Amino acid sequence: MNKPPTAGEPPTPLDDLLALLDLEPIEENIFRGTTDRPILVPRVFGGQVAAQALVAAGRTVPGDRQAHSLHSYFLRPGDPAVPIVYTVDRIRDGRSFTTRRVVAVQHGQPIFHLSASFQTHEEGLEHQEPMPAAADPSTLPTAAEMLPRYATHLGGQDRVERILEARAAVDLRYADEPPFASVGEPREAKSQVWFRTNGKLADDPLLHIVLATYVSDMTLLDSVLLAHGRGGWAVGDVVGASLDHAMWFHRPFRADEWLLYDQESPTAQGGRGLARGRIFTQDGRLAVSVIQEGLIRVPRGS
């Protein structure tokens, strides 16, 4: 992980996040992760659990192999009052690929399951979809500039402050109006955000993949909400949670440099919505593909 903050200087939000993701080894193949206090919802943020699980897997893999995919299921809500124990099963160590399975446990029960695959670098066929058009991130308002405009939609200034606190380690900028800006007005099921960490990161490739995994769970289901004119959990007109989450890491990238997260939803049904995303570097390289299904229920009378 990153170097600790300089003595005498208070830790930044990014320092706090990196400390949160830096697991404690307690036995061979067993790690313990702390949990963050709940700011927005009374459970552990799913992106945190996924990122910590990937850290646990990566700690058991040779350094010449990088994560190229993960597949995961959220099984139970995480309890922010107690640590999470991650057990790693070393499924396979082949000549080119390494596979790990991680189970996150609280109160004696699994809350999250992840399988991750790592590969040594190889040369091969190359092609990719072109990067979609998107506004320059430097021209977009920061969260601190944008969110106060929607304080009424979000439930007041206190709610705005809590959202800003929860995302303080990440500079995340909406390229279009967020779902809570147009409640009752269905739009195309597509959304875009730019993001980068609020501070520089060390050069460890796994660290950048872990930070992208953390952020990837923040806005992916927005596109589902847009199709129905719903503001989402931010305004309380739906009840939602991540059910599963899959990512493929195609090309090297840095999470402390601007990344475009292009998101869309092809379908929603049965109280569930499907969303898929593509993460591009600012110079147009397709770095990551993401797919997630989420629980999305409409409260009675809403």
Image: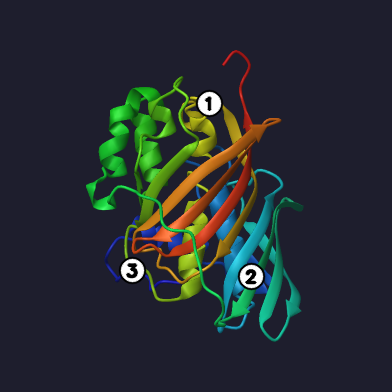
Judging from the image, what secondary structure is the residue with disc 3 in? loop
Question: Coloring scheme of the render?
Answer: rainbow
Q: Position of residue 116 (x, y in %)?
A: 66, 66
Residue at image position (68%, 77%) is 98
Disc assigned to residue 30: none
Q: Is residue 199 above or below residue 67?
A: above
Mark 3: which amino acid?
A: Pro
Q: Position of residue 274 (x, y in %)?
A: 62, 41
Distance from Cα at disc 1 to Cα at disc 2 = 38 Å
Residue at image position (54%, 52%) is 47
Give neighbour class at mark 1: few <14, some 14-19, many 20+ (Cα, 10 Å).
some
Q: Residue furthest bottom?
A: 95
Q: Which residue is mark 3?
A: 5
Disc assigned to residue 57: 2
Q: Earlier in the sequence, mark 3 or mark 1?
A: 3
Q: Examine the rendering and report whether any part of residue 210 can be seen.
A: yes
User: Which one is in front, 167 or 66?
Assistant: 66
